[in-house]
Image (spheres, coloured by chain):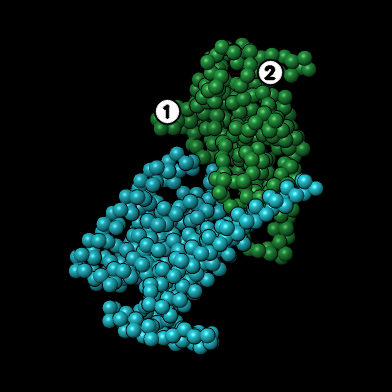
Amino acid sequence: MIGTARIMGNFVAATGLGWNIRHDVDQLFALHFMINAYRAGTMVAVLAGAVGWFMVLRQQTFAGHTLALVSFPGAAGAIWLGVSATSGYFTACVAAALVIALVPRPASAQGHSEESAVIGTVQAFALACGVLFVSLYGGFLNSLTGLLFGTFLGISDRQVVTLAVVALVVLAVLGLIGRPLFFATVDGAVAQARGLPVRLLSVVFLVMLGCAAAEVSQITGALLVFALLVMPAASAQYLTARPVVSLCLTIAFAILITWLGLAIAYFSVYPVGFYVTTIGMAILVLTRVGRSATVAWQRRGGDAVIGA
Amino acid sequence: MPASGAAPAVHFQDAAVRLAHRTIWSDVTLSVEPGEFVAVLGPNGVGKSTLVKAALGLVPLSSGSAAVLGRPPGHAGRDIGYLPQRRSFDPGLRVRGIDVVRLGADGDRWGIALPGATRWSGSRRQERIRVDEVIELVGASAYARRPIGEVSGGEQQRLLIAQALVSRPQLLLLDEPLDSLDLPNQAAVAALVEQICRAEGVTVLIVAHDVNPILPYLDRVVYIARGGAVSGPVAEVITSATLTRLYDTPIEVLHTSDGRLVVVGQPEAPAHHSDRHTGVPRP
């Protein structure tokens, strides 16, 4: 894998960005690994957008971050054992999701400390295991950077298929439980009184979050998953309070961030995780500033009406 | 059994609830007839909310039996509108009031909301009309399209009452709906609930620790204290003697010149600022 990266690196450095957009796009998709990166990235973006939207609404970002970090020991352990890194990502994340789901999620804010304590413990232990696996393998440092900060090189056809299957299954489940999950998120007590299985929905959602975190980690690296899990959802929720509109906007932002990030990373020598995160942050800052400006403008407009 | 022969809206027979090896209350027998406006009163911590949860089937009875709308608890689904004890929405929650109200109509339906569903489905169109109707009914039209975290406590409470009403329930279970509202809002929300009870023929069971705002509208009162419950007409239960005995602290019932009742705790009672904890009605 080091070899591939080095060869690709040399090639990437050799390609140049010009003023002819058609030519640039042709260059972008000239190589099979780049087509795979776009295929994988797009599916991951759609999944991360949809699941991330619910995660932000449910205020489970800490759980999401932990599940993402768990992907690091998962992948490192898998490489050490000689099995595919992809299976390591999913096994570790889903297992950690089930551990976090063991702690009942409190209806009120009082029980949050226990939940945070458990999630924090899982997170620290996961990172510790990751370090152990890396040193057991014998210092595979080039790959370590990829695991933590993302790489788009060398996504195999098989990996693309796996990512697609998992994404489709999770999205199908989300399509099935979407509205009850929204109900349980916004108004758990009433949802429960209506006979909805609120506890089960919470467990299912954590497993879906685990799957999403495992997928995003494979593009952005374990440390930068929030670029796709949090930033698009937070930006969209700044812009609108209409659930369907904001969910669609979230997915659109996630796709935009991924496409742009991959394209810039292709023409530069620096890691994709940096570009994806930076574009995500730029969108977040722009939407936040835009909202403040709109609110201020509306307030001034309101005052003017009162004054008139 | 009432003269009409209809089953009681809520019926408990020798019911008891034990939670974590502690008996919350026992030997509770009470009936709420259809169309009645009934308050559940009593000091805090005696299990008023538990009574509501038992009626919803969220808390199992350890003995005795219960029936809600002629069915076992937990089987009345959309026929019950439920307002849990004070939920405050996170100020940053970017979901509109109307979306929260709509969840009362379709939140328990599996799947996702498809845009444009009202165009091809008659029942979805009916639902949307009903959502607008209840928002109008509770007077929340002006702020229903704002994020619910940004509106005031009283406005949130109106939206939540609209949510409880949207599925056309036969029974409203309201757990402390007036808690943490200011005085004008307490009176307004109490009047609104009474008006709904009469206009839509809904039975209302309302839990309260402060009886004054709802006193004019009550048909009957259920009192929970010391592990049991008493129920009776307002004139029998809301008396200085009965309340003093039930709350175990001096309480006076005054008659105003226009015939209203006012419940007053003793001025020297040290419970004034902590009335929420001792359950003494606010002076």
Above or below, A192 relative to A88: above
Residue A263 in the image: state x and y as whole percent.
46, 77
Instruction: Check the picture and name the quadrant holding the N terminus of chain B.
Output: top right
The residue at the point 68 percent across, 26 percent down is: B213
- Secondary structure under tag 1 reads strand
Chain letter for the residue marked with disc 2 in the picture: B
Above or below, B189 relative to B225: below
From the viewer's perspective, tell me whether residue A83 is left or right of residue B5. left
The residue at the point 49 percent across, 85 percent down is: A18
Graded by Cα atoms within 10 Å as few (under 14), some (14 to 19) or many (20 or more), the crowding at tag 2 reads: some
CA separation, marks 1 and 2? 34 Å
Q: Is residue A51 visible?
A: no
Q: Which chain is cyan?
A: A
Residue A201 in the image: state x and y as whole percent.
48, 53
Graded by Cα atoms within 10 Å as few (under 14), some (14 to 19) or many (20 or more), the crowding at tag 1 reads: few
- In the rendering, what colour is chain B? green
From the viewer's perspective, tell me whether residue A48 is left or right of residue B153. left
Q: Which residue does the numbered mark 2 point to in the structure image?
A: B262
Tell me whether circle 1 and circle 2 mark residues in contact (CB < 8 Å): no
Quadrant for residue A290, please give it: bottom right
Q: Which residue does the numbered mark 1 point to in the structure image?
A: B22
Furthest-right residue in this view: A308
Q: On residue B192, which mark appears?
A: none
Instruction: Check the picture and name the quadrant holding the C terminus of chain B.
Output: top right
Amino acid type at circle 1 is: Arg
Above or below, B47 relative to A223: above
Which comes before the other along the chain, label 1 or label 2?
1
